[in-house]
Every structure is written in structure tokens, then in C-alpha cells.
Image (spheres, coloured by chain):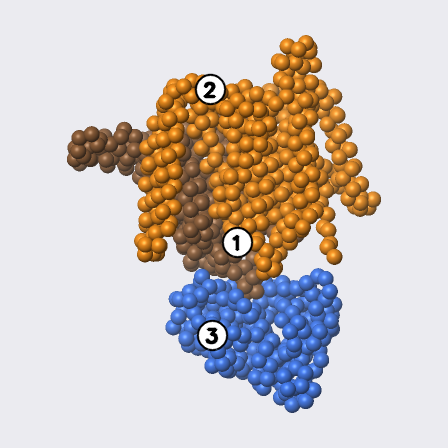
Amino acid sequence: MPLIELKHVVGGYGGAPILNGVNMAIEASDIGVIVGPNGAGKSTTLKAIFGLLRVTGGTIDFGGENIANSLPDKLVPKGLSFVPQEKNVFTSMTVEENLEMGAFTRSDDFRPTMDWVYGMFPVLAEKRRQPAGELSGGQRQMVAMGRALMSKPKLLMLDEPSAGLSPRYVIEIFETIVRVNKEGVGILMVEQNARQALAFASKGFVLAQGQNRFTGTGPELIADPEVAKSFLGG
Amino acid sequence: MDELIFFINRVLISGTVLGSIYALGAVGVTLIFGILRFAHFAHGDMMTMGAFVAFVLAAALTAMGIVTPLPMGFVVLPLAMIITAVLALGLDKGFYAPLRERGARPVTLLIASIGVTLMIQGLTRLIFGSGTRTFFESESKDIFRIDMSWAGGSRPISITEPQIIMFVVTALIVVALHLFLTRSRLGKAMRAMADNAALAQVSGINTALVVRVTWVIAGALACVAGTMLALDVALMPDLAFNIVLPIFAAAIVGGLGHAYGAIVGGFLIAFAETMAVFNWTAVLRPLNGILPEGMALPANLAVVPTEYKLTVAFVILVITLLVRPTGIFKGAST
Amino acid sequence: MSAAATTSPKGWDSPLRRGLMLFAAMFLVVVAVGVAQGTASMLLILVQATAFALIALGLNIQWGYGGLFNFAIMGFLMVGGASTVFLSYPVNAAFWDSEGPMMLGRALLAFLAGLVLVLLARQSHRIGLRGKAKTTLVVLAWIAGYIIYRSQIDPAAAYIESTAGFIGGLGLHPVLGWAFGGLVSAVIAFFIGKISLGLRTDYLAIATIGISEILRALIKNMDWLTRGTMTVSPMPWPTPLPQQLQAWGSSIPESFMLARVWFLVLATIVLIAAFIIVERAYGGPWGRMMRAIRDNHIAASSMGKDVTGRQLELFIFGSVLMGIGGAILATFTQIFDPSGYQPINHTFMVWVMVIVGGAGNNWGVVLGAFLIYIVWIISDPLAQLIFLNLSSLTESIGWGAIPEIDSRSLQMRVFVLGVVITIALRYAPKGLIPEVVRREG
């Protein structure tokens, strides 16, 4: 049974639906990458899973139940975590406090998880007492991911984690994502750097107008001439 | 020396009293703004409400023949704080929460808080009449006079018992608030939500709980501030409505959404007010000996006449808004 | 108003029909008040409600058209009142024969000198002062200007207050006084708008309420100008006073009725004129642009519209109506009492009128003004009635009478006002007659 499965998901912000039947299935071992043109409903798909917009049709199965329209404070304890694209750190709070907020739903001791996160991002351990707002863009992205990992998620969702980062950081972030995945966390992410992201994706989804257009492994999609021509810029 | 004693009595002590009251009120205003993003105009009336709760409790205890070494107003304070906190929760549930659920804009909530102001004012006057009451009907207000003759002063420094307790209570509350916001999980969650409400929600923070905690704290502090004001001056239905504006000024000067800023802002406004109406000739009189003939200090050398005391806060407010709208500390940006 | 809030929308879909029904209902309420309280009382309420309708129209321009928050309404009403005192109150010969005018002239010169000082300091970058140095100089100039002005105005004020009382008026026609009230309000609104319109809504609310309190403190304490708490009365009327009518042979009750009818006619003419101007402006290109700015600030400014300039126009326009309304109120009551102005009665009540009536819709706002004013007035006797009955009930069961019924029931109207706006926000947030959204093109 897949970790999460979307079946014919329809949804939007009231008004005309943005998602018109999205299908997806991700295993715990998968890195899923959603690509597609602007306005295809990529970020919207993540938000629909996370209860940030109204799902009016279809089902989202996670851990054996339909979680459509559940709110984040119910989803996070179930093992879902989300890194928004922008404003994804608490700028006035220290790095360590940011991580603590990621563990808000946990009642057990989260120190080991925090050590694990610091192990993954050593630079954050150095700056643990510094306000997150003072960090560089790449470091902020690490804080954001670290915060999301503090709840020990089964599935980590990232909305354009490489947006606005310099090429050096893009590679670093992607490497970290692969490392997180190796530790047993399923990944579902939206990416603009489509070619780069699909290269390490075990599941790739090409969305257009709120529907699946192509599905396959990342390398398969890159190799597909039609995908390459229409969605990967030739 | 007498000049200094006069200064301590008239500026230092009364400024600290007023500052404590402003600070505790402004913390509530700033927390509500940080979490719920609207200017809660009914905050002054929450203070009045709290003061009346304390008054009723104190009167009930006195009627039961209970006598305490401390002023009754302070003895009943913990219970009054709890009751006012519950009332504050009720106000939110009854008047603000339904509007939030509908997705109303913050400005609608602001207007709603005017409605709440009117209702509380009307109700308190309906129940208690519009006259003035005092906590010290059956007990006396002890005044301590610290003899300063050892330092060459002919007059004592005088301070009342409620004023001393007020300083202690305010200090305790400020420390407790600091520990809560920096050490406790909920306090940190509150700061997180004030910083970035959307991300707080995404992190799984129970935002409804944070909102409730905010009202509880704001209500409890409003009760303390209102009761202190009533203990220091007198209790009347329009008690706090008149100081809700300086309190907003304090919150804005400190940066809306910034709890420590509100405390600093409260004392800043209070001291600005007391010093602006203070007659500086009283302190500078010794200079008359140095000044050349015909240049004596005028009898009254106050920056503004006493009747303009309240406007000092507004002038500071307006200047802050013009020069540095985010306050002396950076306030909430959106 | 509960009738409108609870009726199903079916059959009410035509805004015109809905408006007509509501106005008819209001007319019935007015007649009922007339029957219950007598025609003279009803006329009194109507004149004041007319003035408040004018004020509410002013707020509608600012909030309904422009989305500008204004909590300084009370300040503008006071400015209007004080202005009409200055223009229409009889000339005070004691003042003009004394040293007063000279001293005031010197104070004015001192004020101008201070102003020049500040303006010069602000130009100090031309002689090479920048940053902190310039700021320091400007602050010093402000302080120097303040001291210079205080050194002249304090003795002048003390002198006038001790000899002539206050400067009195110019003895001109009250209608000129009303116009002057609008003019002074416009000038003050220009400065308030200049400094505060760039602020976000909640900051604007707090800033304007602060400015309103500053205005109140000034008008209340400048005894030499406004007589302060000693109040100015009797103010002359533009129409014949009851005493005059009595001299011309009317009976006493008749004279009061007739005098108020005349005043009502005049006030209504002012209201209708203002209404037509406001309504035309709203329908024209100017109003279209205003709504565009209100609904989408950023888009409008990116289209090259001068957003701040237009908002300033709105703010001034609205404040003029408030000033005129305040002047009419002061003239009608024949007394200018600065301590009689309260934020509840003069700022918040106008907000309730606009919100309940329907922000953005002039018909709605006028309806709201009349309705709320009547509710405000009749809450008192109604509460008294309830209290008296309750009191006799508690007495009969041995709990004793309710004390202070008079002052308590007077407070009832504050509570009622709060309840009304709460219900309106909850169940009819767009008001009784909502704004008609016109789609262009």
C-alpha cells in the first residue's frame, strides 16, 4: 500500500476548481517530483493535501484513511510535514526555537530529533542561538526543512525548495533531500528546476491545467521527447 | 535636597505607577494585535470590567467581616484575574470569533470592538451607576513617609502602600511574562504565531489554543491594570476608556506585536506625561542664585499646562507614527 | 432594523423596493415618536438627525467611498461648532476696545516667526547640513518656535480671559458661520490627511482618535477663543427664534413648533444639496476612480493614479460636511459646550449610522443616521419605562426600588448602540441598503 495516494482530487479556493482530478501515489522510499507550467496546480496539490484549501472531490489516502480537508494540526501528528515556498521561517525567533516549533505537536522528548537535524545541517548547530531572520537564503531553507523534520514525518512535502537559491545551494538542498529520503522519509516536492529535480526523482508527475499529463520515473520523463519538448524547454 | 525629594514624589513615583498601569494594558493590546491582527479598542473597558470584578469580590469579602493586612483589592486580585480572563474568552467567543470565522477583515473586528466597548460601558453603568467608588471605604490607605532629614531634606518621600505593592506586582508579572514567552512551549508558540501565523498553522501549532491563551493573558493583565488604576485613583465606569489611548500609544511606540516594547512604551509614555506637566521651577529654583538679576525663573515652568497632560501621549503617538511607524523596536510588519 | 435583517431575501431583491420600504418604515417610526412625545420633540429629533445625516454622509465619503478610517469625527464637529461661534456670535466690544487684539496680533506674529524658523531649519540641507545635524536643527527650531509662541500667547490669553472673558464673535449670519465651519475643517483635514493618510487602517484609526482628542483639549482649554468649559450661549439662529415668533404674536407651543420647522427646512436644504453633490460625484468618473483605489490600492497606483492625492481630496471633502454638520448642531442647540462632546456620542454613533445604513450607499447612510439617532434618543425613555416597571415589581416582592433610575436609563442608550452595531456586523455586514456594485463596461 502506498504511503499516500491521491485519487481524482478536485479542489480550489471557492470559485472554479484549480485541481481537476489529480492522481498520485508515493511510497515511503520515493522521491516524488511535480513539474509543469505555471498555474498547472503544482503548489495547489501540496496545499490540498495539507488542508490549506478545500477539496471538493476525490480522496487523499494517508496511513489507511482519507485525510482530505483535515487541518494541519491534525495532519502533522499523523506524519505529514510541509515546507512552504516563502516566509517559511519564524524570522524573529532563534534557529533552535524554530526547530522547537516544528515539534509543537509532539509530547515526547524531541532532543534526539533535534540532534539528528543538527547532524544533517551542521551550520544550524553553530547558529542555534541566532534569529532565523539574520541567516542567508540557503540557511533559512535549511531551518525551514529542519523545522518540518522535527515532527518526524513519514512524508515531507516541499514547495519549490530551490527557489531563489544560488546554484551552489540548489545542489546542496537537493543532496539533503536525497539524504532525508534515505533515512526513510517519503518526499513529495514541486520544482521549477524541473530537469535537475527529475534526475533524482523516483516518481515524476507532469501536471497541466490541474490534471496529470504524464507520470513515470524521473529519468523516463526526461527521456520522453514529448515531455521534454512541451514541459522541459526542449 | 528638597527639590530632589519633590521630584521623586511628583515624577518618579507617580510616573512609575502610571507606567505600570500603561505597561500592563499595552501588553494585552500588543499581544492581541500580534495574534489576531486587530486593534482591540475595548481593551480599556476590559480593564474597567476587571476592576469592577475585583471591587465586587473585595466588597463581598469585607462584608463577610474578613480583614487582611494587605489592601483587599490586592488580596482578591488572583481570583479577579481568573474571572476577567474567562470574561475575555467569552467576549472573543461571542463577538470576535464569529466574525473571524466568516473571514472578516481586521478593520471589521476593530469596529466590532467599538461595539463591545459601548456594550461594556453601558452595562457597567447600568449595574454600578455612573458615580465614583473607592476600594478604601472601610480600610485606610497607608502612607509611608521616608524621613530624609539625614540627607538634609526637610520633607519626607511619601509613598502609599498600594503603590509599593503595585511596583512589586508589576515586576512579578513582567518576569513571569518573560519566562512564559521565552521558556514555555505555549509562549513560544504565541511568539511564533505573532511572527508568522500561516507558518504557525503549517507547523501544526494549535492556533485556536494560542488565541485562547492570548485572551486569557490579555484579560488577566487588563484586570490587574484596571484594579491598580482604581486603587491608585478611584473606580468609575469610564475609568479606563480615558486611558485606552495612551495605552495604544504605548503599544505603538513599543512596536505593535512586541510585548517588551509595550512595557518600555508604557513607562516611556507615562514618564513623558508626568515630566511634561511637571513644574520644573520647583527643581531648578536653586539656579535663581546663579542667574543674573532680572532673569529669575518664572513661577511655573512646565512644558505644557496640566490640562494638556493627555495630549502628550497623542503627540508622541503621532510623531512615532510619522517618523518610525514600526515603533522603537521593530513591530509586527503586516 | 430587525425586520430587514430577518426577512428572507426573496421579494427584496430590488434594492429600490427595499430602500423605499425601509424609508417608509422609518417615516412610521418618526410619526410614532411624534404621537408619543409631541410634535415639538419630534421636530427637535428631526433637526438633529438631519445634521447627523450630513455628518454621516461625510463619513460615508471617507469610509464608504475611500476606505479611509476616520475616528476624528468628534474633533471636526467641535471645530465646526467653534468656527460658527467665532463667526456668528455677537461682537464682544470689551475685547475689541482692550489691548487684546494687539496682544493676539503679537502672538500671531510669534507663531509666524516660529513657523518661519521651522521652515528654514527644514531647508538647512542647502547650507550643507545633512542627516543627524539637520534633524537636530529642525527639532531645535520646533522647540524655539514653541517657546516664542508660548511667550506671547500665554500673557495674551491670561489678559483676555481676565478682562473681556473671550474674544467673542464677528456677528455675521449663522449660515456664513456654517460655511466657515466647513472651511476651517477643510484646512485642518488637509493637515491631518497630509500627515496620517499614508498609515495602515488600524494605525490611522488610532492616529485620528488621538488627533481628535488633541483638538478637544485645545478647544476646551483655549478659554480666550472659545470660553472653554464656561460655554458660549445663546447662539443666534439663521431662522426666527421662538422668542421672536412670540413677539410677533404666536402662542408659546406654536412658536417652538414653527421655529423648529423653519430650522428643519433650512437644515434639510443643506442636506439635500450635499446629498446631490455627493451622489453625483459618486456616479461620475471621480467616484469611479475612488472606488478603484479603495478596492485595489496597488493596481490603481500602478495605473498611474495619484492615490494619496485622491485620498486627501476625499478626506477633506468628508471633513467639510462634518464641520458644517457640527456647526449646525451647535447653532441649533444655541450653546457651544466643549465638555459636551464625547467620542461615544459624536464619533462612534456616526460610525454605527454608516455601518448600519450601508457604507458606500448614500441613501442607506441617511436612513441609518435617522434610524440610529431616533433609537439613541428613545432608548432613554424606553429604558426608564422598563426600569420603573421593574422597580415597582421588585418593590412589590420586597427587594426594594431600583436606585438612580434616571442616570441608569440614560446609559441604556450606550448599551443599545453597542448591541445594534454588533448585530449589524454579524447579520447584515453590508448594512440595510448595501452599496450597489456598478459594473463598468
| Tag of residue B35 | 1
Q: CA distance from mark 3 to mark 1?
A: 28 Å
Quarter of the image where one finds residue C434:
top right
For chain A, the rendered hue is blue
Could one spot residue C241 in this view of the protein? yes
Secondary element type, mark 3: helix
Could one spot residue B240 in this view of the protein? no
Residue B56, image x and y in percent?
A: 50, 32
For chain B, the rendered hue is brown
Residue C215, image x and y in percent?
A: 47, 35
Residue for badge 3: A138
Question: What residue is at 65 percent from the left and 78 percent from the top?
Answer: A36
Identify which amino acid the numbered label 1 is placed on. Answer: Ile
Q: CA distance from mark 2 to mark 3?
A: 76 Å
Residue C279, image x and y in percent?
A: 69, 42
Question: What residue is at 54 percent from the left and 59 percent from the top?
Answer: B197
